[in-house]
Image (spheres, rainbow, N blue to C red):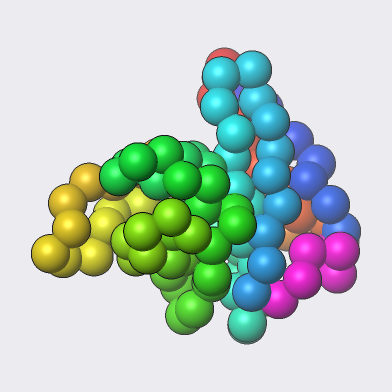
Amino acid sequence: MSNWVRVAPLEEIPKLGARVVRSKDIDIGVFRLEDDRIYAVNNSCPHKGGPLSEGIVYGDKIACPLHSWKISLVDGKADEPDEGETACFNTKIEDGIVYLELKE
């Protein structure tokens, strides 16, 4: 079963910026790209747990603020030569509002 949670109006998430949604189990980073696409991943880098929402967004990737690992916002996978991945979450925009899908 899924539950769509309201994050914020799209305009309140800066381009190349993020918001953090705290669920009962994890923090989720919700990212807005330059072209207004929205992606969401576990906010913890698979390397050392750095807060991805505090990293630099470029293209469709996020650079972890701790050690600059590049993580794809599309599939959650680290760029080579690094290995690892983080969970991805579905998002949608309806009437200018960003929503995040949480599984129950």
Name the residue nearer the viewer: 90 or 33: 33
Q: Is residue 62 above or below residue 8?
A: below
Q: Is residue 20 above or below residue 93?
A: above
Name the residue nearer the viewer: 18 or 40: 18
Residue at the spot x=18%, y=58% of the render? 82
Q: Quadrant of residue 14?
A: bottom right
Locate the N terminus and report the quarter of the image it occupies.
top right
Q: Give the side of residue 33 with respect to residue 14, left or right.
A: left
Return the residue found at the far left.
81
Part of the protein shown in magenta: 10-15
Q: Is residue 97 above or below residue 45?
A: below
Name the residue nearer the viewer: 91 or 7: 7
Q: Position of residue 62 (x, y in %)?
A: 46, 65
Assess whether residue 51 is covered by the magenta stretch: no
Residue 73 seen in the current view: no
Return the residue found at the far front.
66
Number of marks present in the image shown: 0
Name the residue nearer the viewer: 81 or 1: 81
Residue at the spot x=64%, y=17% of the render? 24
Locate the C terminus and report the quarter of the image it occupies.
top right
Q: Position of residue 54 (x, y in %)?
A: 60, 57
Q: Give the side of residue 91 with respect to residue 87, left or right.
A: right
Q: Quadrant of residue 16?
A: bottom right
Q: Position of residue 53 (x, y in %)?
A: 59, 54
Residue 60 seen in the current view: yes
Residue at the spot x=86%, y=64% of the render? 12
Q: Give the side of residue 37 with respect to residue 49, left or right.
A: right
Q: Quadrant of residue 70?
A: bottom left
Assess whether residue 14 is covered by the magenta stretch: yes
Q: Is residue 97 above or below residue 62?
A: above
